[in-house]
Structures are given as structure tokens and as C-alpha cells.
Image: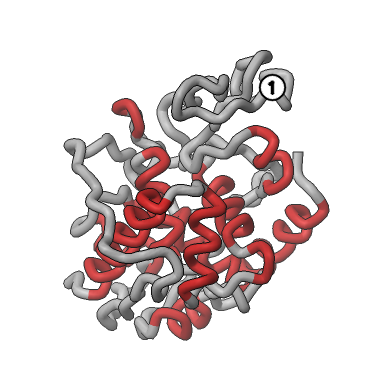
């Protein structure tokens, strides 16, 4: 169920698909790469299984410090007839632990937000950092992320029943999203609580639905959520306020910070 803002966003996404979105990414990332992808139908990509588990070390930074440095990627040209966004995603996926298909979701969310809320200046790397922590880019529990941007099995979190270390949230959706009629559970690759999804539900791929299990939809909803309250994510206060609103934990923010910077550095030096 989408709200009026989400409906307007679908219009934005469709408009972006008709524009030369290459200019948005080139201007934002300085890549000099002509991007011709649309947001309505992201390019197909092979399924990707989970890599070996890796420990994420928190960055040695404090809340309110400068936002993660997003370096500009190396300039390159795509072969004639190729999809530059897909070429970029494939190359970045070869040097970071992010499936190419997930990168398409994150970059499309970035591009849409540049049209929908340009003052936010969110980065694909920040959205990807959240996706890594929340579900390993849709690959939690040995799932695979398919061509349709959905994990091979739905991702549903633990019951939010107030046990130690867990918030207490009673059922808000009649079990429609999480299958639990007693307590809410976070759902999908970006781990939205049902009540939060109801507010921020977004159709990120133009199929007429807002599905939290679909990474295209969930990544764009996360972008909208992070950019709320007039935040500018290139500032320290804006970035930390956004990420800690997603999960009010300093260590969580430090991990997302570390991941976002590492992904950006890897993307900037890819060959």
C-alpha cells in the first residue's frame, strides 16, 4: 500500500526513465560515463549467492563527524550497444562483495532521489552500506538475489517481542507482510518494520506494486526514508541523523560508514 508521496515518486521514476539519466550520474559522480538505463525496468543480472561471511569493522569516527567520503569513480567508456549502468555495476561487483543486481537497485534509487529530492544528495554507497548490514544485499541465510531483485526466499526477522536486545512492537499489519499476527517483524532486504513500510512503501521498478521483499522497491523506500526531514547527507549532521534514524546505534552507524567508504573507494579505482 503506497501513500500519495509514493505515487508521485512513481511518476518521478517514469520521468527519469525518459530522460538521459546518464547526465545525472555523470554530474553527481564525475564519471564521464554515459548512462542510459531507466528506473522502470532495471537490466537483468545473474543471480548471486552469498560470499564467505566477513566481519564488518566499525569506522573510528563519532556521530556528527563528516559524512563518508564518496570518491569519484574512474572515467571509462562502455562498448557500443552496451548498457553503461550494467557495465558499471558488473565492474564494481568484481571488486566488492555486492551483487551486480543489487548495485543496480542502489544506483537506480540514487538517481531517482536526485530527481525527487535533489537537496538530499544521498549516495548509492550509503544505501548499499545499509543493505550490507541489514541482509548482505538480499543474501542473508544463504539466499541468492535473483534477476527480479528478490531473494530466493523472503527475508523475515525475529519477532519484536521485547526480549533482551529486541524492541517490543505488537502486530500492525495482521501478519500480511511478516506472517506474524502477534508481533511485528522486520521484512525484506532492507528490513522494514511493517508499520514503517506502510508509510514509505515505494514502487521502485514500475510494476505498480511496493514490495519490501523486492530490492528495487526497498532501496528506493530507504532512500526516501533517509532523505526525510530535509536532510543533506553530504553533511555530518545530515548523514548521521539519517543512518541513526534507521537504527539508533553508534556502532551500526560506524559500520555503515566504513562500508560506504570502502565501496566508494573500490568503485573509484576499478579498471
Kindly give the residue lying farthest to the right in the view shown: 4
**Which residue is denoted by mark 1 in the rendering?**
171
Q: Residue at x 31, y 74 (%)?
A: 78
Q: Is residue 53 above or below residue 74?
A: above
Left or right: residue 259 versus residue 119 is left
Asked if residue 117 can be seen in this view, the reply is: yes
* Residue 217 rendering spot, x and y as whole percentages: 58, 47
Residue nearest the viewer, comparing 259 with 100:
259
Q: Residue at x 38, y 55 (%)?
A: 129
- Crowding at label 1, few (<14), some or many (≥20) Cα neighbours within 10 Å? many
Q: Is residue 92 above or below residue 98?
A: below
Left or right: residue 80 versus residue 2 is left
- Image quadrant containing the N terminus: top right
Q: Is residue 77 above or below residue 151?
A: below
Residue nearest the viewer, comparing 36 with 166:
166
Which of the 4 quarters of the picture holds residue 136? top left
Amino acid at each position: 500500500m503506497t501513500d500519495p508521496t509514493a505515487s508521485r515518486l512513481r511518476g518521478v521514476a517514469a520521468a527519469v526513465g525518459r530522460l538521459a539519466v546518464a547526465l545525472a550520474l555523470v554530474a553527481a559522480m564525475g564519471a564521464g560515463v554515459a548512462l542510459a538505463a531507466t528506473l522502470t525496468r532495471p537490466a537483468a543480472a545473474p543471480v548471486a549467492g552469498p560470499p564467505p561471511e566477513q566481519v564488518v569493522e566499525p569506522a573510528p569516527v563519532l556521530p556528527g563527524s563528516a559524512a563518508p567520503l564518496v570518491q569519484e569513480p574512474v572515467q571509462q567508456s562502455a562498448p557500443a550497444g552496451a548498457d553503461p549502468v550494467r557495465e558499471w555495476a558488473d565492474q564494481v561487483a568484481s571488486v566488492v562483495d555486492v551483487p551486480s543486481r543489487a548495485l543496480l537497485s542502489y544506483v537506480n534509487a540514487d538517481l531517482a532521489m536526485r530527481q525527487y529530492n535533489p537537496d538530499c544528495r544521498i549516495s548509492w554507497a550509503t544505501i548499499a552500506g545499509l543493505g550490507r548490514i541489514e541482509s548482505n544485499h538480499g543474501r542473508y541465510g544463504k539466499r541468492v538475489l535473483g534477476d527480479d531483485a528478490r531473494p530466493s526466499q523472503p527475508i523475515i526477522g525475529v519477532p519484536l517481542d521485547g526480549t533482551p536486545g529486541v524492541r517490543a512492537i505488537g502486530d500492525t499489519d495482521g501478519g500480511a507482510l511478516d506472517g506474524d499476527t502477534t508481533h511485528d517483524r522486520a521484512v525484506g532486504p532492507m528490513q522494514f518494520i511493517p508499520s514503517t513500510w506502510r508509510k514509505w512503501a515505494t514502487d521502485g521498478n514500475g510494476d505498480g506494486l511496493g514490495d519490501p521483499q523486492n530490492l528495487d522497491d526497498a532501496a528506493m523506500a530507504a532512500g526516501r526514508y533517509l532523505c526525510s526531514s530535509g536532510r543533506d547527507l553530504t553533511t555530518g549532521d545530515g548523514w548521521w541523523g539519517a543512518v541513526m534514524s534507521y537504527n539508533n546505534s553508534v556502532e551500526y552507524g560506524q559500520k555503515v560508514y566504513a562500508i560506504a567508504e570502502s565501496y566508494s573507494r573500490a568503485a573509484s579505482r576499478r579498471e
